Amino acid sequence: MSKKRIFGIVFGLLVVVVLVGIGGASVYLYNFAFEPKSPLNSKIPAKKASRLAADKKWLKNVKQESWNEISAGQDLKLHAAYVPAKEKTEKTIIVAHGYQENHKDMASYIRMFHELGYNVLAPDDRGAGESQGKYIGFGWPDRLDYVKWIRKVIAKNGENSEIGLFGVSMGGATVMMVSGEKLPKQVKAIVEDAGYSSIESELTYELKARFNLPKEPLITTAAWYTDFKAGFNFKVGSSLKQLRKNKLPIYFIHGGEDTFVPTKMVYQNYAATKGTKKIWVAAKAGHAMTYYDYPTEYQKKISHFFTEYLN
């Protein structure tokens, strides 16, 4: 056998090995991010853990309704908890939960809005809580589900409904992604807390932070695999692109010491939208900890913002 032929065979085998390795890594990244089997952030700061435990107990006992909806595509049955205000009102806050969470993990915020006098609708996203689905959508396919939840609130509470959108972490990105859709006039304002600028940017950041790996080729190949498995290409899931179409007032909140969704992303998000906007970077807060570190100030700022636009 000639040296040229041997070289060709060896080179071909190396190509196969590399392709198999990239393919395997792409599947791993998909499973790690979109079909996780265990929580990535299982250790909750003590300050949050004690407060959240009390608020979850409150949520379990407060008067509420179970709402259902069908997802936008894929015909998944979705669930949400609806907590009516103590006194009848047409003002409703829809809250979006974070990564690997469900509506119960938003108990502190649900309680806050309830005590401020709002109705609260808290959906379980696809693959979370009592909703069907086998993957996490990072807010992108979910944004269309939230449009359906918005319309359901209007159908239930009337055309005079006034609606605010609120989300934390992945939920923050979700409501930013919703902002770029054609929304009913009843949606008045948005508050996002700790949301990322795009799915691609967040996964690229985590790929480097957790595995010390470069962006390519894994981000592209994992996007292909995600499209195959979950039915959407995460590369198109961008808060920035949606915010450029946003016309609603929006309040951006972020922890100044956030190492899960880097703080720089809030400035990118803030710059992207041209409408009325405010920003609060809580200097010493970690990821999604601003409420738990500054509860009084947080409630005051949020209350003032929504009161201004839901009136």
Image: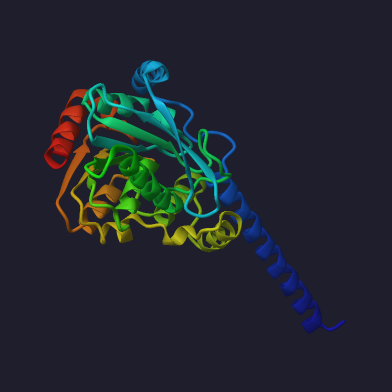
Count numbered badges in the picture: 0
Which quarter shows the C terminus?
A: top left
| Residue 80, image x, y percentages | 43, 35
Q: Residue furthest right?
A: 1
Residue 165 visible in image: yes
Which quarter shows the N terminus?
A: bottom right
| Rendered image coloring scheme | rainbow
Q: Is residue 221 shown above or below 278?
A: below
Query: Which residue: 47% across, 53% down?
Result: 72
> In the image, is 100 to the left or to the right of 277?
right
Q: Nearer the viewer, residue 77 or 26?
A: 77
Query: Which residue: 41% across, 52% down?
Result: 144
| Residue 174, image x, y percentages | 37, 47
| Residue 223, image x, y percentages | 53, 60
Q: Is residue 200 shown above or below 56?
A: below
Q: Is residue 235 shown above or below 36?
A: below
Query: Which residue: 26% across, 28% down?
Result: 113
| Residue 206, image x, y percentages | 45, 47
Q: Nearer the viewer, residue 89 or 72?
A: 89
Residue 195 visible in image: no
